[in-house]
Amino acid sequence: MSTENEGNEGNAVPAVPSVPSAPPVPAATPEGTPDGVPPATRADEPVADPGAGTTYEDQPQAPTQPVPPLPESHQPLPQPPHHQPYPAPQPPAAAGAWPPPPPPAVPSYAGGGAGGPVWGAPVAPSSDAPRKPRANGLIAAVVVAALVAGGIGGALGFWAADRSGSSNGSTTVAASDTPKDLKRADGTVAGVAAKALPSVVTIDAQGGDGEGGTGTGFVYDKEGHILTNNHVVASAADSGQLSATFSDGKKYDAEVVGRAQGYDVAVLKLKNPPSGLAPLPLGNSESVAVGDSTIAIGAPFGLSNTVTTGIISAKNRPVASGDGSSNKNSYMSALQTDASINPGNSGGPLLDAGGAVIGINSAIQSTSGGGVGQSQAGSIGLGFAIPINQAKNVAEQLIKTGQPVYPVIGATVTMEEKTGGAAISAAGAGGTPAVTPDGPAARAGLKAGDVITKFNDTVVDSGPTLIGEIWTRKPGDKVTLTYKRDGRTATAEVTLGERKGDS
């Protein structure tokens, strides 16, 4: 209750204000007051003049027959109306003041009009009954005020308990920390990571000459095959040591089953694989769309079990990566992502929002010149992954035969980027013909000097772009090449040939 009137002094006993014959209209509820809760009395509300109105003795009599009064011990307490709202509480009297203030004006009892008795008014005495002392009226007023105040207090208490939602009166909520509540829903990044991490390994490759490094791989099947990048294991492929460490810290020796330098794909096998291996599910990289969410898992700079997120920022991005040697470059028509990828992420899975592998993280774009004294380049938001459809085909071939198989057109193209396409060279490597005699390109009528501008419906702007597109196919596939010769445009249907092993 408000204490705004505490400290006001006054010794006069204020008279009880007259009781209206009809229920008073309550003031508008102030803003912010909950529905059903009577507004508190404001300090600036007008207060009835203590000298105004009538006393109990001066209360006008109701036009009814006089009723003999009951003995004082049998006087019933006034009952509140069943359907009338509680009147607004009155401020308490000044400290030490007596008698207390009169009860507030109240509505007619049970909806009675001006012709009946009113709640809070004394029963009309008979003409021969002695008058009760005034003190009794004051005691009755105190009882009525107490009942009214108790009703308002109960309503406020009920509203407060209902709003807090707590039976013990606490206004705080404790967060549960049980393992059940810490589980993450499927489809969230945390949920996908929790399922994928046990199937991702950190690869340590140490060559016989001391050269080596750290990369990533993931469980490809239940037999213990691990899929990764060729450049992760190349230093230890011939003479060295390879190991794979799972997210639980368990470490296993591994060996190379096969590797494809041109695709930058390699397959390892755990020497003593544990039981219960869970291969990561493979998605469909052809159905990926720009803007799709991505999750990358790896060991950037040796920090194992690192999870980063992003989106697919481009598709069919031609990428040539390697050590700069013309015969050691890898080519891909890559998925581009802005998920943070750094050295050590190589060979790790690029997942979609559902946790399926859509690519193998392989390369990054960097602003670093790579000069002496410069540190390794870091992520600038341009990472590239080998599409999983292509990597799966290569992996199956490596597991089956131990060597890669490449689709080819039987022509040598230049690696220049300003030719307006993929130009067929004047001569091949080592003085061999640029167009292999009786090869796929020769049978389709292509010649040295022709500039290939399209591979099916994909625009070709350079030699690496053409190679990357060819390597997304299989030997025996039929493709349409659009080319220019002497200023004229023509098309040719080519059946792709094959080349086994790296050369």
Image (cartoon, rainbow, N blue to C red):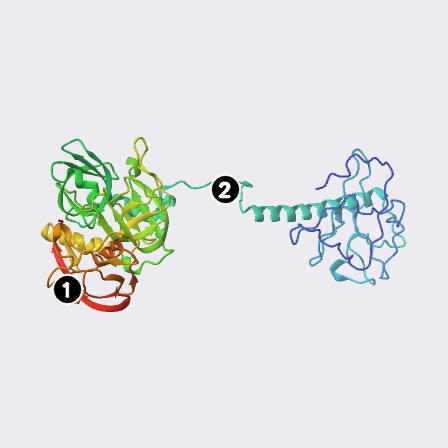
Tag shown at residue 173? 2
Question: As rendered, which of 450 and 457 lies closer to the eye?
Answer: 450
Residue 374 to residue 419: above or below: above
Q: Can residue 256 be seen in this view?
A: yes
Image position, residue 51 (x, y; %)? 90, 45
| Distance from the alpha carbon under mark 2 to that under mark 1 | 77 Å
- Circles 2 and 1 in contact, beta carbons < 8 Å: no
Instruction: From the viewer's perspective, tell me whether residue 173 is left or right of residue 351.
Output: right
Disc 2 versus disc 1: nearer the observer: 1
Image position, residue 3 (x, y; %)? 73, 38
Q: Which quadrant of the view contains residue 241?
A: top left
Image position, residue 353 (x, y; %)? 34, 53
Residue at the far front: name it. Answer: 486
Task: Name which of mark 2 and mark 1 comes first in the sequence.
Answer: 2
Question: As rendered, which of 166 and 296 lies closer to the eye?
Answer: 296
Residue 76 to residue 378: above or below: below
Q: Is residue 282 visible?
A: no
Figure label count: 2
What's under tag 2, amino acid-wise?
Answer: Val
Instruction: From the viewer's perspective, tell me whether residue 148 is left or right of residue 444.
Output: right
Question: As rendered, which of 228 and 221 lies closer to the eye?
Answer: 228
User: The N terminus is located in which quarter?
Assistant: top right
Q: Which quadrant of the view contains residue 342?
A: top left
Secondary structure state at the residue bearing disc 1: helix
**Residue identified by numbered label 1:** 442
What's under tag 1, amino acid-wise?
Answer: Ala
Image position, residue 168 (x, y; %)? 53, 41
Secondary structure state at the residue bearing disc 2: loop
Q: Residues within 10 Å of mark 1 (few under 14, many from 20)?
A: some
